[in-house]
Image (cartoon, rainbow, N blue to C red):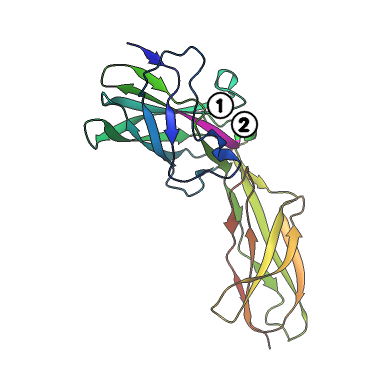
Amino acid sequence: MRRRATAAIATAAAFSAVLAVAALAVPAAGADQDDSGTTFWNIDVNHSRDYTVGVEAARKRVFSVSATVSDPSGVQSVSYELWHGADRATADGVMTGAAQCVKLNETTSFCEALVSADPNVNLRSNALAGVWTISPVATDGAGNVTRGDGAYLARIKRQTYMSQTVATPQPVKKGKDLTVKARMTVAGWETQKNVPLIGHQVLLQYRKGTSGAFVTLKKIKTDRNGWATATVPATADGAYRYDFAGTNLTQATTGSADFVDVK
């Protein structure tokens, strides 16, 4: 059995303008590799458009990783290794999953694995939030092993939560001030509890009446307890809510709206 150091990777959509640089992996110097080689393409993570997985504070999150895999001698087995860090040798976090493969034709299979992200096992530090590299590994029909190092990326993020928005006083007279509050928390993998999300920007949004789009009124930063608080004049009956766009480390979320009756 020969081991091929690296495989060509082709993708249907770019991960982002910055991350797509790794879309084609280059064989390591001196690697023993067929001229044809094994190819991995249409790689998908969690059926998510931006390859994102949100993980709660103390609950295992199982998500899918899949690819279409081709080799001139066929595909015997595939697995996926996700790792966090500058390189695989010094990775500070690793997740793995063995794929179930469905044969599409003599040379090509669709291979999907379930991977577990677990604060009790492989996500014990908040520092593990962010970009993880995917290394697919395939054994072809002849028993040759090919690893696609550094070829594709996933985002493993801390799950965030927005409390119900509360606007007071209610009812309110037109032109009088409303105070609108909501609290943000985020999964703490180290403590396995949700903790306040401090100093992050959220958007106070308003929708006149009971239908239509929400518009942004103000940008607010959460305080040390995770609260977002804003004061706005009451203009007409409508709903208020807070929206959080997320970061590279935390999931986006939108709070439930509070409808205000203006007299």
Counting residues from the start of the chain, the first of labels 2 and 1 encountered is 1
Q: Amino acid at mark 2?
A: Ser
- How many labels sit on residues? 2
Whether residue 5 sits left or right of residue 157 in the image: it is left
For residue 16, say whether it is visible.
yes
Question: What x and y, as percent, mark residue 225?
Answer: 74, 51
Q: CA distance from mark 2 to mark 1?
A: 9 Å
Q: Is residue 228 above or below residue 193?
A: below
Residue 133 is a magenta residue:
yes
Q: Are marks 2 and 1 in contact (CB under 8 Å)?
A: yes
Question: Which SS does the magenta portion mostly show?
Answer: strand
- Quadrant placement of the N terminus: top left
Q: Which region shows up in magenta?
A: 129-135
What label does residue 93 carry, if any? Answer: 1
Question: What x and y, as percent, mark residue 4?
Answer: 40, 17
Whether residue 211 sits left or right of residue 217 in the image: it is left
Q: Amino acid at mark 1?
A: Gly
Question: What x and y, as percent, mark residue 107?
Answer: 26, 30
Whether residue 221 sits left or right of residue 151 in the image: it is right
Quarter where residue 86 is shown:
top right
What label does residue 125 carry, if any? Answer: 2
Task: Pick whichever, 35 or 46, lies toward us.
Answer: 35
Residue 127 is a magenta residue:
no
Q: Is residue 97 above or below residue 204?
A: above
Task: Pick whichever, 91 or 24, lies toward us.
Answer: 24
Question: Dot 2: few (<14), some (14–19), or many (≥20) neighbours within 10 Å?
Answer: some
Task: Pick whichever, 62 or 80, lies toward us.
Answer: 80
